[in-house]
Every structure is written in structure tokens, then in C-alpha cells.
């Protein structure tokens, strides 16, 4: 056999292998985004949204912002107490740990400071086991500063409670979503998005990172304003999710708009940096309409219940639409 022909054939085979690997990688990256939106019947969507129990959800907010939880700082006993409370609720809904991701417990622990902090994770099986919708919010806050507790009601006990309420509704509805839904309460967000960063690393290790998308809730309880904001955290694959969130949120009667700018960090950024679809729902203008952020006055008593209800009902509808892709 002619050596030059043999070398040319080898180069062609190598090039073909490179192309096939690239196509396979791209296919994995687009796995979730290639799926079509399911047209959820109006009666089903109305049923899901109308299951919202404002008083029950707010009782969870009141508990998490009480002095017993000391501001829920990551890596402290107060974070552990908050985690125990959240796990008890998830278990009461009948949810299990995310066994398919290799987690035998509800806690996904990671190093923080001299010890550890935790993400709290539970899963609701869907019709598909190939794609996972993560619905998340950070449950930590900044703790006790100069002897003063910072309760973190708006930031982010309400977001945490909204995720728990979505979990309760989905599990009690008797309906099965198209995608498997994973409920994630992130730890150490206030330390620099550490919990979400650690979860992304873990998902990459488990080769699940390109089979997930994230709907994140953060500071959805502003003191004023009338607009739910959909934050696109910078990955081109977010576009369809942003558009769907705006479409579904507006049906509930709330104003909805998109933005790609934010004065601060949110957990969806950790995902989008790694080319994972991820958006965050927030309320209004963070600087003008959240005067109590990171202040001792961010208390249960200072929450605007009407805004909480409007934002949560929109989030419930968006979450169910997202879960049916």
C-alpha cells in the first residue's frame, strides 16, 4: 500500500473522529434546548397556580426569619438548623434525594471556611429521566453582624419558601411533569455564589451538566414596584427560557420584563458561565425597590404580601411551563 495514501487516509479518519466528537458534544449541550415546549392545557395550568397557599408559604418565611435561625449564615449552626427545617418540609411532600446524581442524602456538602456548607436538594421524577429542571433559591443570608441579626426575609427567605411551595404544589397535584424536577436550595450564595458553583462542578463530574436547566428565584419580595424581572445571566441558550418566562408570567397579570444587567450576583450566573441554561426571577429595581437588603430591617414584618403573592403566582406558572419541556 502506498505510504502517502495511507497517511492521507489516517488524516481523514482523524478529522472525521474530531468532527464526530464535536457533534456529540454539541448534541449534549443542546439536549434540553432541543426539546419543544409542551402546550399545557389551560385547565391544568389554572389548577397548578390556584393551589398556591399564601398563608402556608408565609408561615415558612416567618419561621426562617425568626431569631432561632440567626440570619442563616453559611457554615454556622444556624445554616444547619435552616437546612434541617427545609429537609423536613421536602420529606413531608414525599420527595427523595437526587439518587440519579449520586446523592444519597438531601445535603450536598462542600468545603467552606474551616468546615462545610450545604446545598439542600430533592427530586420529583418526571416522564423523562434524561433532562432535569432545577428550581432553586439560596437559603443562606449574612447572619449576625456586630451582635445584630440580619433576618434576610426578602433576601432570600421568600425565594426559599416559594421554591418549597412550588415543590409542595407539584407533588400534591397528582400530575407528572415532562422533565424531572430537582428542587435546590443553595448554600453560601452570600459568600460569592459558592453553593451554585460547587453544584455545577459536581454536575460536571457526574456528566449531568448538559442535561439541566435552572430557574432561580432571588429577592422576589420588593417593598414597591409592579414588575417581575427575568434576568438573563449571559448564555445564548437562555433566550428561549427568557421568552417563555415572560410569556407565562404575563398571563398571571403581573408586568414582566427581561434584563441582562444586574448590580450584584445571583446563582444562575454559576450555571450560565458553564453554558448551562439558567435564568433568575427578581422583583423590580434592586436598588430602588429593595431598601432593606442586607439590613437588620429585612424582616418578615416589612414584607409586602401583595408583591410576594404576585411574584410567587407568576413563578409557579413559569415553573410548571418549564417543567413541561
Image: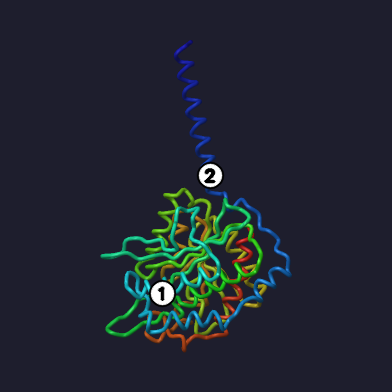
Left or right? Give the position of 297 relative to 325: left
Q: Specify the quadrant of the image occupied by residue 240.
A: bottom right
Label 2: state its secondary structure.
Answer: helix
Callout 2–callout 1 Cβ contact below 8 Å? no
Q: Specify the quadrant of the image occupied by residue 297.
A: bottom left
- According to the picture, the residue beneath numbered tag 1 turns out to be 82
Q: Earlier in the sequence, mark 2 or mark 1?
A: 2
Of 286 and 309, which appears nearest the observer?
A: 309
Label 1: state its secondary structure.
Answer: helix
- The residue shown at (32%, 72%) is 76
Q: Quadrant of the C terminus?
A: bottom right
- According to the picture, the residue beneath numbered tag 2 turns out to be 26
Q: Residue 285's mark?
A: none
Q: Is residue 248 above or below residue 59?
A: above
Residue 177, percent from left and from top: 63, 61
Residue 67, percent from left and from top: 37, 84
Few, some or many residues within 10 Å of mark 1 (<14, 14–19, 20+): many
Residue 247, percent from left and from top: 65, 67
Q: CA distance from mark 2 to mark 1?
A: 39 Å
Q: Is residue 126 above or below residue 46?
A: above
Of 39 and 99, which appears nearest the observer?
A: 99
- The residue shown at (45%, 63%) is 106
Choose mark 2 or mark 1, whichever is in front. 1
Considering every residue shown, the one lying at the far bottom of the view is 301
Task: Specify how the rendered protein is coloured.
Answer: rainbow
Amino acid at each position: 500500500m502506498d505510504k502517502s495514501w495511507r497517511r492521507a487516509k489516517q488524516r481523514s479518519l482523524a478529522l472525521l473522529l474530531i468532527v464526530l466528537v464535536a457533534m456529540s458534544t454539541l448534541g449534549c449541550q443542546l439536549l434540553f434546548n432541543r426539546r419543544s415546549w409542551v402546550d399545557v392545557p389551560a385547565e391544568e395550568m389554572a389548577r397548578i397556580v390556584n393551589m398556591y397557599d399564601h398563608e402556608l408559604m408565609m408561615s415558612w418565611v416567618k419561621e426562617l426569619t425568626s431569631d432561632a435561625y440567626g440570619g442563616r449564615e453559611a457554615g454556622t449552626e444556624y445554616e444547619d438548623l435552616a437546612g434541617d427545617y427545609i429537609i423536613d418540609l421536602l420529606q413531608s411532600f414525599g420527595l427523595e434525594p437526587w439518587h440519579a446524581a449520586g446523592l444519597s442524602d438531601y445535603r450536598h456538602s462542600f468545603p467552606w471556611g474551616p468546615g462545610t456548607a450545604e446545598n439542600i436538594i430533592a427530586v420529583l421524577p418526571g416522564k423523562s429521566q434524561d433532562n432535569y429542571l432545577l428550581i432553586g433559591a439560596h437559603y443562606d443570608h449574612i447572619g449576625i453582624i456586630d451582635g445584630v441579626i440580619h433576618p434576610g426575609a426578602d433576601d432570600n427567605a421568600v425565594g426559599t419558601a416559594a421554591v418549597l411551595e412550588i415543590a409542595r404544589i407539584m407533588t400534591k397535584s397528582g400530575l407528572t411533569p415532562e422533565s424531572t424536577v430537582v428542587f435546590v436550595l443553595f448554600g453560601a450564595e452570600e459568600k460569592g455564589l459558592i453553593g451554585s458553583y460547587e453544584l455545577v462542578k459536581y454536575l460536571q463530574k457526574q456528566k449531568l451538566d448538559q442535561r439541566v436547566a435552572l430557574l432561580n428565584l432571588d429577592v422576589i419580595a420588593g417593598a414597591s414596584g409592579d414588575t417581575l424581572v427575568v434576568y438573563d445571566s449571559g448564555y445564548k441558550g437562555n433566550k428561549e427560557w427568557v421568552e417563555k418566562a415572560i410569556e407565562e408570567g404575563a398571563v398571571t397579570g403581573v408586568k414582566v420584563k427581561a434584563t441582562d444587567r444586574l448590580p450584584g450576583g445571583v446563582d444562575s450566573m454559576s450555571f450560565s458561565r458553564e453554558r448551562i441554561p439558567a435564568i433568575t426571577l427578581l422583583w423590580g429595581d434592586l436598588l430602588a425597590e429593595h431598601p432593606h437588603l442586607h439590613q437588620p430591617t429585612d424582616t418578615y414584618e416589612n414584607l409586602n404580601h401583595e408583591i410576594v403573592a404576585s411574584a410567587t403566582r407568576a413563578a409557579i406558572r413559569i415553573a410548571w411551563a418549564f417543567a413541561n419541556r
